[in-house]
Structures are given as structure tokens and as C-alpha cells.
Amino acid sequence: MDEATQRMIASKGGQAAHQKGTAHEFNSEEARRAGQKGGEAVSRDREHMAEIGRKGGESRQSANRLARQGKEEKH
């Protein structure tokens, strides 16, 4: 089963649970803990984290370059 089909089926299940009143509603503490666990899981993948860092550096470098070009054109 492809990912899009799987997501569609899961979405329908979630909608049905909400309509039925049996869906779990996260409180802020549960949501915080879930986010923390997700962040911990992602950060274990060092290669992925390095890729994120590279992209951030490239983006920042590009933004700085564009800002400098804008200042030069005004003078």
C-alpha cells in the first residue's frame, strides 16, 4: 500500500473516532512529551541532523548574500 493511501485510511479512522467521541484528546503535557520523544528519536540519526545543519547554513548564507546585494544596489 502506498503512503498516500495509508494516510487517507488513517485520516478516515481518526475522523470517525472524533465523530463517535472515542478519539483521544491530548492535553498540553501529553503533547509536550510526545513532541519531546519525537525530537529525541530524530536527533539519534546523526546523518540526518548533519544534513539539516548543512541546509540551514546554506539557507542562511544565501539570505545574507541576498541582503548584501540589496544594500549594494541602494548605494
Image (spheres, rainbow, N blue to C red):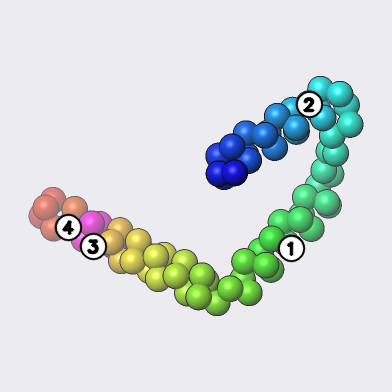
Question: Percent position (x, y) of residue 13?
Answer: 75, 32
20 relative to 13, above or below = above
Is residue 32 positioned above or below 61 on the image?
above
Mark 3 highlights which residue? 65
Q: CA distance from mark 2 to mark 4?
A: 53 Å
Identify the residue at horizontal 81%, vertical 22% (top origin). Answer: 19
Q: Residue at x 77, y 50 (%)?
A: 31
10 Å crowding of disc 2: few (<14), some (14-19), many (20+): few
Q: How many marks?
A: 4
Q: What is the three-letter code of the residue carrying label 3?
A: Arg
Residue 9 placement (x, y as % from top left)? 67, 34
In the picture as drawn, the residue positioned furthest to the bottom comes out as: 46
Residue 8 higher or lower than 37, as above or below? above
* Res 63 label: none
Q: Earlier in the sequence, mark 2 or mark 3?
A: 2
Q: Check disc 4 and give the amino acid type.
A: Gln
- Crowding around mark 1 (Cα neighbors within 10 Å: few <14, some 14 to 19, many 20+) is few
Give the quarter of the image for residue 64.
bottom left
Q: Quadrant of the C terminus?
A: bottom left
Please, which residue is most extreme toward the right here?
Answer: 22
Instruction: Please state which amino acid type lies under the numbered disc 2.
Output: Ala
What crowding class fits label 4: few (fewer than 14 Cα within 10 Å), some (14-19), or many (20 or more)? few
Which residue, given by chain and number where applicable, does mark 2 sit on? 16
The residue that disc 4 covers is 69
Residue on which disc 1 sits: 37
Residue 65 on the magenta segment? yes
Earlier sequence position, callout 3 versus callout 1:
1
